[in-house]
Every structure is written in structure tokens, then in C-alpha cells.
């Protein structure tokens, strides 16, 4: 099963030499490239990437932003940082951001290849199977209450997909730009697949709420219907996107709690949410400062007092405070609350 | 001073950088912003806060405590937080060095 590795660097010579140098490993992994973070985001959206190697300093979208995008949308994809501007601080930030490897330029291409291969091997630490029917195999995952990530390739088309299981429950699926049930329908319509199992499932939002059996049956039914109609459309694309859940209108604190649970998820360092008007005059001061800077209406503030907790302040009739662990997923939380 | 803050100023989304004393007196400002009245009041209200990241409707203001006051950065909403914090972490030791010995004010060009 040849895996796809995405290399991101704005230095075209570097990209070319990496492509050339790594081509001797093409039985193990293939290479696709992007010249900046935005190009990488497109590539990630439209194909199934197993690993990303990225530079940090790039135009349009830098490596940290790309790393944060990957951790948010594709937490199962390992990221290796390569940089010519290396400091221990930068390495710490990259690792805190979720990078599994950090290599300072210049480096030996074979060393990078070794790192890539070692990392990719972990994708299949639970074994690899060829020419199987996905449906029967996946029911076994449910029966055995497996926690794993299953990567599948359809033999005839070369399409790739990923399924995420937690204790036998199908949490999410991804296939090109499809997510959740839509991706599961697509994957379950494949007849002859090769698959590899990784004995881990990264923390992720639950996008699939129905049980595997029901989705498998629906996928088969949709596939038969499409066959009868003689349409080449994929079952996944037939599935309508579910409407966004409505957030219940309650107190500001409850709304913030619900919003964070939905948009950020649990276990990202959020410790408490409460009202605290002792911050009121400080928040008014932020508003005045924003007016002086012509920055517009105040939305959200992150405050680090050097204590064991940091605070996120949200203005309103009362100030809503989110107490967080200093090692929380800060950018993710701020991005969600700032919108 | 521009040399020390060069990486920050070169970031795509950065719209302005201010270095001020702990009383809010502006010691360096690039480009000129009309904040002389509001900044001292707010800096005094910070009360020693190590770091403040303020998101507004149109921009973002990032403030970081230095040895002698605060480094204040005005930036767009899509700036990379991690990259900004990294550049600030790297600039702080040089800011500290520049502020030592001869007295901070004698070394900073005042833009007021």
C-alpha cells in the first residue's frame, strides 16, 4: 500500500531535490508537493495524505498555521517540520503544536526518508490486509470493540479513505473532500480494498452518530439504487449534509459552554466557565484601547498573568470568563470564540 | 530598534509595533498611531499581566511584558499566533540587552 507524503516548502530547488532524492523510495511512499500552506490545505482537502513534511517560514500561510490546520482537521496525519531557521524555542513551539518530528536544514535526504518510513510504519502497526470486502471486515472492528484508524484503498480506482473507530464505534470517516457519514457511504460502496490498521485513534469530533450496521446497509441500498439507475455518482455525494445543530438559548455562561463543547470539544485545556464582573473595568479599558487603534468592537481576550491558569474574557452584560490551562489549545479556542 | 523588531514588522499581517514603558510612555512606534492618550491608561490597568491577546472586530492587539514595559503589536485577524509569539520570544532578549546600561530612553528613538 503506497502512502502519499506531502512536502511543503516555498524553496522550489529544495522541493525538486527532495522529490528527486526521495523517488528511490517510491515503492513505500509517493510524493506530492505544495509551495505554501494554502497549497497544502488544498492538497489535503482533495487527496488522502498519510504524512506532511513542512517548512516553517513560507508566504501566504506559514508552517505553524498549516500545523494548526492539520491538527484541527486531520489530527491523524503526522507532521514533520524542516526548517533552516532553527532554535530550541521554535522546536518547542512546533512540538507543542503537534509536530512529531523536527529536522534542522541542512539534512541528509536519506535521514528524512528513514524518519518518514518509520512514521508511516506506525500507520499499519495493527496489520495490513489485501483484497477484502470492507463491510465484513469493518463489522469485526465493531464486534471486537477496536480503537483504531483504518486506511483503505479501493483497488480498481486507487481511491483512498480513512475510518476512525473508538471502542468499536465508528466516530468519523474521510474520503477526499467528504467527511463523516458521507465519506463512510463512499468507502462502504467499495468492493475490493486493501487496508491497513493503526492501533490508535486520535481525539476527534464525533461526526457519525448512527451505528455501523445501519450505515453499511444504507450504503449497500444506495449503491444498488445507483446501479439500477445506471448512474456513476458516488453514494457519499447523495447524502445531504445535516443541518447545523441549534444552540439552545440559555445564560451566556451556558451558551459559551455549549459553544466550546461543540466547536472545540472536550479535553483541550478548558477548566471552567463562569461570570466574573471583577474584570468589568478592565474589559471597558480594552474597548477604549480598541477604539484608539480603530480596531472595531471588542470580541475576546486571552490573558496570561503567569499563574497556573490563564483567562479568556468575553464581553457582554456580564463578563464571561473561561479559565484555561496555560497549555490549552489556545489558538483553536481563540479562533472559535473570536468568530 | 527596527533591526530587533524586523522579523515582527516583516510579518504579513502586522500593522504596527509599539514599545512602551511600564507607565505607557511610548518609546518606539512604527508606523505612527494615535494612541498616546489611551495606551498609558490601559498599560497601567494591565498591572503586570505577562501577555494579553485582544481580538476585535477588525484587528487584533497583542501585548507582551518586557523588562521595562510592554511590546504592543497591532495585527490583522488572520495572523499566525504561534509565529508571532515565536518572533516576540526571539526579540525579547535583544530588547532587554538594548534597555540595559545606558538607560532605556537614551537608546530608543522617540516618535512623539
Image (cartoon, coloured by chain):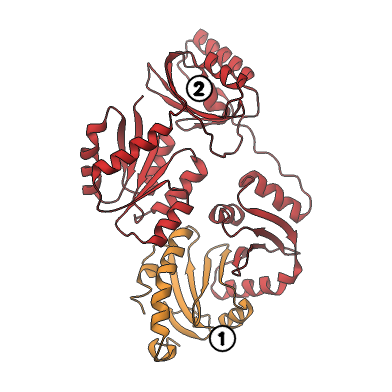
Disc 1 element = loop
The shade of chain A is red
Chain bearing tag 1 is: B
Chain bearing tag 2 is: A
Depth check, front residue: A49 or A285: A49
Horizontal arrangement in the rendering, residue B28 relative to residue A11 (left or right)? right
Depth check, front residue: A31 or A28: A28
Chain letter for the orange colouring in the rendering: B
- Measured as percent of width and height from the top left, residue A152 is found at 44, 23
Q: Estimate the spatial distance between the alpha carbons at disc 2 and disc 1, rounded to whole Å.
A: 62 Å
Residue A313, quarter of the rendered image:
bottom right
Q: Quadrant of the C terminus of chain A?
A: bottom right
Residue at horizontal 68 percent and vertical 55 percent from the top: A271
Residue at horizontal 58 percent and vertical 56 percent from the top: A334
Could you tell me if residue A84 is visible in this image?
Answer: yes
Task: Decide: is A18 above or below A196.
Answer: below
Question: Within 10 Å of the Cα at label 2, are there few (<14), some (14-19), or many (20+) other Cα atoms?
Answer: many
**Residue on which the image places disc 1:** B23
Residue A78, quarter of the rendered image:
top left
Residue farthest right in this picture: A250
Horizontal arrangement in the rendering, residue A217 relative to residue A33 (left or right)? right
- Measured as percent of width and height from the top left, residue B67 is found at 49, 80
- Measured as percent of width and height from the top left, residue A157 is found at 38, 19
Q: Are marks 2 and 1 in contact (CB under 8 Å)?
A: no
Could you tell me if residue A48 is visible in this image?
Answer: no
Per the rendering, the mark at residue A201 is none
Q: Quadrant of the N terminus of chain A?
A: top left
Disc 2 or disc 1, which is closer to the eye? 1
Task: Decide: is B7 above or below A137.
Answer: below
Task: Decide: is B15 above or below A30.
Answer: below
**Residue on which the image places disc 2:** A186
Amino acid at each position: 500500500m503506497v502512502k502519499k507524503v506531502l512536502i511543503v516548502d516555498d524553496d522550489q530547488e529544495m522541493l525538486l531535490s527532495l522529490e528527486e532524492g526521495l523517488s528511490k523510495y517510491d515503492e513505500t511512499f509517493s510524493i506530492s508537493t505544495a509551495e505554501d500552506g494554502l497549497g497544502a490545505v488544498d492538497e489535503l482537502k482533495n487527496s488522502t495524505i498519510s504524512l506532511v513534511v513542512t517548512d516553517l517560514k513560507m508566504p501566504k500561510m506559514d508552517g505553524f498555521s498549516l500545523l494548526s490546520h492539520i491538527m484541527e482537521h486531520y489530527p491523524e496525519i503526522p507532521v514533520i517540520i524542516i526548517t533552516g531557521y532553527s532554535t530550541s524555542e521554535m522546536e518547542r513551539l512546533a512540538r507543542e503544536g503537534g509536530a512529531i518530528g523536527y529536522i534542522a536544514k541542512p539534512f541528509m535526504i536519506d535521514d528524512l526518508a528513514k524518519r518518514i518510513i518509520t512514521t508511516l510504519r506506525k500507520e499499519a502497526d495493527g496489520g495490513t490486509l489485501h483484497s477484502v470486502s470492507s463491510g465484513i471486515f469493518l463489522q469485526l472492528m465493531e464486534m471486537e470493540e477496536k480503537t483504531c484508524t483504518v486506511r483503505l484503498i479501493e483497488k480498481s480506482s486507487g481511491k483512498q479513505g480513512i475510518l476512525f473507530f473508538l471502542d468499536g464505534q465508528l466516530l468519523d470517516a474521510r474520503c477526499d473532500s467528504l467527511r463523516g457519514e458521507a465519506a463512510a457511504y463512499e468507502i462502504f460502496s467499495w468492493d475490493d480494498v486493501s487496508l491497513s490498521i493503526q492501533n490508535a485513534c486520535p481525539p476527534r469530533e464525533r461526526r457519525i452518530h448512527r451505528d455501523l450496521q445501519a450505515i453499511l446497509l444504507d450504503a449497500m441500498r444506495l449503491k444498488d439504487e445507483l446501479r439500477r439507475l445506471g448512474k456513476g455518482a458516488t453514494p457519499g455525494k447523495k447524502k445531504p449534509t445535516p443541518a447545523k445543530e441549534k444552540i439552545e438559548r440559555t445564560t451566556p455562561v451556558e451558551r459559551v459552554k455549549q459553544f466550546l463543547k461543540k466547536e472545540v470539544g472536550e479535553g483541550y485545556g478548558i477548566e471552567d466557565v463562569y461570570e466574573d464582573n471583577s474584570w468589568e473595568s478592565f474589559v471597558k479599558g480594552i474597548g477604549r484601547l480598541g477604539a484608539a487603534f480603530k480596531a472595531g468592537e471588542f470580541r475576546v481576550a486571552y490573558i496570561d498573568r503567569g499563574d497556573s491558569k490563564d483567562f479568556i474574557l468575553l464581553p457582554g452584560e456580564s463578563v464571561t470568563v473561561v479559565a484555561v490551562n496555560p497549555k490549552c489549545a489556545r489558538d483553536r479556542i481563540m479562533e472559535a470564540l473570536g468568530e | 530598534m527596527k533591526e530587533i523588531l524586523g522579523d515582527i514588522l516583516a510579518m504579513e499581517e502586522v500593522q504596527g509595533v509599539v514599545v512602551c514603558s511600564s507607565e505607557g510612555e511610548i518609546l518606539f512606534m512604527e508606523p505612527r498611531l494615535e494612541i498616546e492618550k489611551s495606551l498609558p491608561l490601559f498599560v497601567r490597568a494591565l498591572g503586570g499581566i505577562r501577555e494579553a491577546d485582544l481580538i476585535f472586530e477588525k484587528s487584533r492587539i497583542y501585548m507582551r511584558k518586557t523588562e521595562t514595559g510592554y511590546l504592543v503589536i497591532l495585527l490583522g485577524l488572520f495572523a499566525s499566533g504561534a509565529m508571532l509569539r515565536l518572533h516576540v520570544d526571539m526579540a525579547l532578549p535583544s530588547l532587554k540587552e538594548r534597555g540595559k546600561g545606558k538607560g532605556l530612553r537614551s537608546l530608543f528613538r522617540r516618535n512623539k
